Image (tube, rainbow, N blue to C red):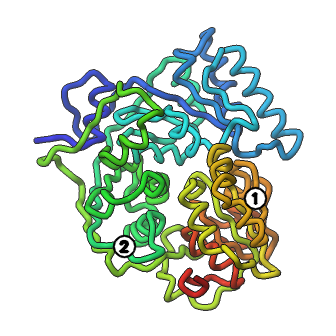
Amino acid sequence: MGMTMVEKILAAHAGRESLEPGEIVNAKLDLVLGNDITTPVAIEEFEKIGVEKVFDKDKIALVPDHFTPNKDINSAGQTKSIREFAAEMEITNYFEIGEMGIEHCLLPEQGLVKPGQVIIGADSHTCTYGAFGALGTGVGSTDMAAGMATGEAWFKVPETMKFVFSGELQPWVSGKDLILHTIGDIGVDGALYRAMEFSGEVIDKLSMADRMTISNMAIEAGGKCGLIAPDQTTFDYLEGRVDDDYQVYKSDEDANYYDVIEYDVSKLEPQVAFPHSPENTRPISQVGQVPIDQVVIGSCTNGRLKDIREAAEVLKGKKKAPHVRLLIFPGTQEIYKQAMHEGLVEILIDAGAAVSTPTCGPCLGGHMGVLAAGEKAISTTNRNFVGRMGHPDSEVYLSNPAVAAASAITGKIVSPEEVV
């Protein structure tokens, strides 16, 4: 019997010829990630272990991106502790304010993510790196501390669910709609502690930005990781960012899957997830009349240059509704710069948007876009749980950037076709 991608990656990092789902293994780590919320706790646990140095100063990435630029004294203290730890441990990949970006946009851009790697991050959306054929998965701060100390982490080998997408995508349908449709179908626990493997002719044609969006939200279906086999699109993205010292793993034809689910997406419409769950999805034609107060475009899910371009395409020459707050968060400083060079930032500002330095702030209701009681937002982020972006009595709707931009113009959730 052959092996799936996740089984091959874990076997290679555990020094094994083969693995089966359910086995417990210790695996070598290629990268350990933390942010300004999770790293301070990890530092405390690291100090309890009693080692003097991290296992490899080049294989740890610290990105203060959640409450930064610091929103208050407590968040300033958190970031200060990371900064001091990075200096003491001589961490190579510490990204200071002004240099940093939203972590899951930044690390691939910086060439820190390669196919075949095992990456743990004290952030649930570390599964983003599955878009490169890497095993990226979220862990707690204690596991992050152990990983920094030992360079290893333990894993229960997950079963794999395969999702095959066929057909031709309609205009304004993107990777965000594919993953929202999938979560709407299987539910938020439909892939609980399983690897999700995305394949098919539709996936093959997607950009790396769309692939990262899909892998990013694997956790919203309960997935351990969200893997896409590397191909020429992957290699083109990696060229000039990384050397060729990486291993590509692909599932064997006779690999054993927990389930194989096939979707013909030729007639798929843009999807909107209603409160209060990513599984509560509806096609745009069935949304009805939903007025909104705020639009957020950005985050580790949809803050890449392709997303900014799509928003600008919809908003060009138009104005947001007077009562709507339109917030744009490019994923990294480099994305921000490129958006300026292409004239996208001017288009967005002329439309009435506030364009921010990279931050995760509004996604988790941390700062810069917190919702008041009774307010409704449509957002390109990944979660819409109760109180996710502010007051427990607020509501968050999830969509792709084009739908969000169109909704900013009309003041209610609509298809881009209504304004373009």
Please, which residue is most extreme toward the right here? 73
The residue closer to the viewer here, 119 or 407, is 407
Q: Mark 1 Cα within 10 Å, few/some/many (few <14, many 20+)?
A: some
Query: Which residue type does callout 1 highlight?
Result: Val
Q: From the viewer's perspective, is residue 88 above or below residue 30?
A: above
The answer to whether residue 376 is visible is yes
Quarter in which the N terminus is drawn: top left
- Asked where in the image residue 318 lies, by quadrant, the reply is bottom right
Query: Which residue type does callout 2 highlight?
Result: Leu
The residue closer to the viewer here, 6 or 247, is 247
Q: Residue at x 39, y 77 (%)?
A: 170
Task: Tell me where residue 120 appears, x and y as whole percent.
Answer: 49, 34
Please, which residue is most extreme toward the top here? 52
Please, which residue is most extreme toward the bottom here? 289
The residue closer to the viewer here, 49 or 83, is 83
Task: Tell me where residue 354 appears, x and y as whole percent.
Answer: 78, 62
Q: From the viewer's perspective, is residue 193 above or below residue 399?
A: above
Q: Which residue is mark 2?
A: 169
Is 315 left or right of 31, judged from the image as shown? Answer: right
Q: From the viewer's perspective, is residue 56 above or below residue 270?
A: above
Quarter in which the C terminus is drawn: bottom right
Task: Tell me where residue 94 appears, x and y as whole percent.
Answer: 66, 27
Circle on res. 319: none
Q: Residue at x 55, y 34 (%)?
A: 110
Is 151 left or right of 364, judged from the image as shown? Answer: left
Q: Residue at x 43, y 80 (%)?
A: 269
Task: Tell me where residue 375 appears, x and y as whole percent.
Answer: 77, 76
Q: Which residue is mark 1?
A: 355
Q: From the viewer's perspective, is residue 62 above or below residue 150?
A: below
Is 88 left or right of 398, judged from the image as shown? Answer: right
Query: Distance from label 1 to label 2 (Cα)?
Result: 30 Å
| Mark positioned earlier in the residue sequence (1 or 2) | 2
